[in-house]
Amino acid sequence: MFLKHVANVVAERSTQYGDAAGNMAAIAARWSSTLGWEITPSQVVLCLLDLKLARLAHDPTHEDSAVDVCGYAALLRELAETTNTEGR
């Protein structure tokens, strides 16, 4: 039941914010400019995962953070598959 909820949230956010991979690429470009070195979309996802895990360490019952961890983990896998496919 929880994973179905995660899938629904991911789909809803895709509607609100657009393609997740494209969104992470846009964030990576902004963070690269801000920090002065290249940040990849996968690194963005890893940082967002860290943020959510830190929040869960503070409050393990916070459902939104748990949902986001699952969604970001799935996105990280999708980005890895895309990168591997494009790199071949």
Image (cartoon, helix red, strand yellow):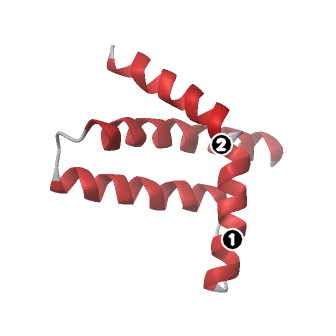
Where residue 14 is drawn, which disc sits there? none
- Image vertical order of residue 68 relative to residue 33, above or below: above
- The residue lying toward the viewer, choosing from 63 and 44, is 63
The residue type indicated by label 1 comes to: Arg
Disc number for residue 30: 1
Q: Quadrant of residue 55?
A: bottom left
**Residue closer to the observer: 83 or 5:** 5
- Is 54 rendered above or below residue 3? below
Between circles 2 and 1, the one closer to the viewer is 2
Pointer 2 residue: 17
Instruction: Indicate whether 64 appears above or below 43.
Output: above
Residues packed near mark 2 inside 10 Å, few (<14), some (14 to 19) or many (20 plus):
few
Residue 11: percent from left, percent from top: 58, 26
Residue under the image location 43 percent in, 26 percent down: 6
Residue extending furthest bottom?
A: 36
Regarding mark 1 in the picture, which secondary structure is present there? helix
Residue at 33% from the left image edge and 13% from the top image edge: 1
> Which residue sits at x=17%, y=39%?
61
Residue at 41%, 36% (x, y): give it.
70
Q: Nearer the viewer, residue 14 or 69?
A: 14
Is residue 11 left or right of 25 when viewed as pictured? left
Residue 35 makes an appearance in the image: yes
Q: Amino acid at mark 2?
A: Tyr
Q: Are marks 2 and 1 in contact (CB under 8 Å)?
A: no
Which mark sits nearer the N-terminus, 2 or 1?
2
Left or right: 25, with 9 as reference point: right
Quadrant where the C terminus is found in the figure: top right
Percent from the top left, x then y, of residue 37?
67, 82
Whole-angstrom CA distance, mark 2 to mark 1, is 16 Å
Q: Secondary structure at mark 2?
A: helix
